[in-house]
Image (tube, rainbow, N blue to C red):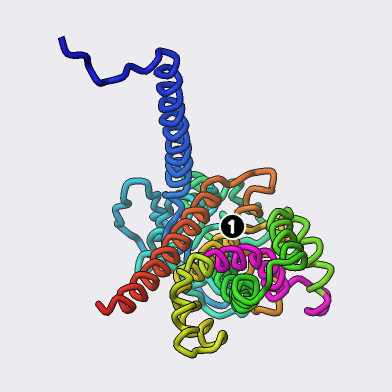
Amino acid sequence: MEKSNERRLPAGRLVKDAFGIGSTYLSSAISVLALIAMLVFVFLRGGKTLRWDFITGDYESTVVSIKTSETIPATHNTFAYQPAPGERFSAKWGIAFQGGKNNEGNPIVTISHVEENANISCWVDASTGDPILVSQGAALTAVCLWTTADRESASVVVPDVKDVDSVAAAFECCDYLMSMSLSEGGMGMRGSLLTTLYLILFSLAIALPLGIGAAVYLGIYAKDNGVTRFLRAAIDMISGIPSIVFGLVGGAVFLPITAGHTSILAGSFTLACMVLPIIIKTTEESIRAIPKGMTLSSLALGASQNQTTFKIVLPNAIPGILTSALLAIGRVIGESAALIYTSGVIIKDYIVPTQGSASMAVHIWYLMSGEHQNYEASCAVAIVILIVVLALNLTLKLISHRIKRRKEGK
């Protein structure tokens, strides 16, 4: 019989290999499941709140106060409107109400329909006295009605303007409106989205030139001595500093530049300091990854060191520079602690770089910092953050791919 050339591994080695492979698969599965669970939670809780008006709408709502004018006679028309499911129609006034939720997930009652000849001709703007057009979609914040025309008679204050049945019943039993407040829009995230884009633009405009210049010096011109080793160690140490420390130092250093108050510029300077180590290390690694033969060939053909750097090294390091920019953008978008002290926590609708405004990450912190934590709106903002990061990632990947194809002559 011929002896087999195959060598049988010891039983202990087989057990160790099986344990190593199994633990690898198990840890990978746990990581993937944790990521999937996080994404599912965010999309399930924020999917209903995430609407176009939430992304593009203002955070501050427009409030209109309405009263009854004594000089305009009231009308008394009849209506035959058939309310849709979920609507409550007041046949006395010709207005339909519907319950719902605002962008923060809180219950509201909105005006869903107004008849063309509704009995609201005597309603005027309380601040100007001008006739007012009640728009559909406006949310009720306060209502006070009269049962008779006598101003001294008891009025009916709707106790719960968030319950559609209470609102409709109050309108049905009363003939005169004393006062009413309507709110339109509000709770949107347009301001925080614009603030985040400003922070990305300003911080990269500051950090990219400085980071690329430092990477070129360390990767090409600097000699391997104690000074450069100290610089690299300092860069590694800075990258490990907690962001709250950056916020404290940034507030002390950069806030005086903007007259002592929080601003987007102060936040951008602070973020630029935070992402500098990322840009320097990633760019330097991409420079060192370029084959030495390319630079030596350029020098051998008579090009100077500066010409080689700017015409050979940097063009070939563009993919690495784009990667560093992407990592920096991710850090800027997800940062909140440093911006609380420098950019501020106030969610504004009209953005001025020299004034403070909350970013999307700070917007989430603001929604979750109160007594009533708003998971729905916070998850909706988180979804927008994921979409922005994905869009920027795909854009940079596309730019890198086109640069590579152009180099290959395709």
Residue beneath the point at 52% across and 76% down: 72
Residue beneath the point at 75% across and 55% down: 244
Q: Is residue 241 visible?
A: yes
Relative to 191, residue 49 above or below: above
Examine the residues drawn in magenta and state their main secondary structure: helix
Q: Quickly name the residue at label 1.
A: 334
Q: Is residue 274 magenta?
A: yes
Mark 1 surroundings: few (<14), some (14-19) or many (≥20) residues within 10 A: some
Magenta residue span: 256-285
Q: Quadrant of residue 230?
A: bottom right
In which quadrant of the rendered image does the N terminus lie? top left
Residue beneath the point at 48% across and 78% down: 296
Q: Nearer the viewer, residue 11 or 384?
A: 11
The amino acid type found where label 1 is placed reads Gly
Residue beneath the point at 45% across and 44% down: 39
Q: Nearer the viewer, residue 10 or 394?
A: 10
Q: Nearer the viewer, residue 226 or 53?
A: 226
Q: Position of residue 67 (x, y in %)?
A: 59, 68
Q: Nearer the viewer, residue 166 or 192?
A: 192
Q: Is residue 352 magenta?
A: no
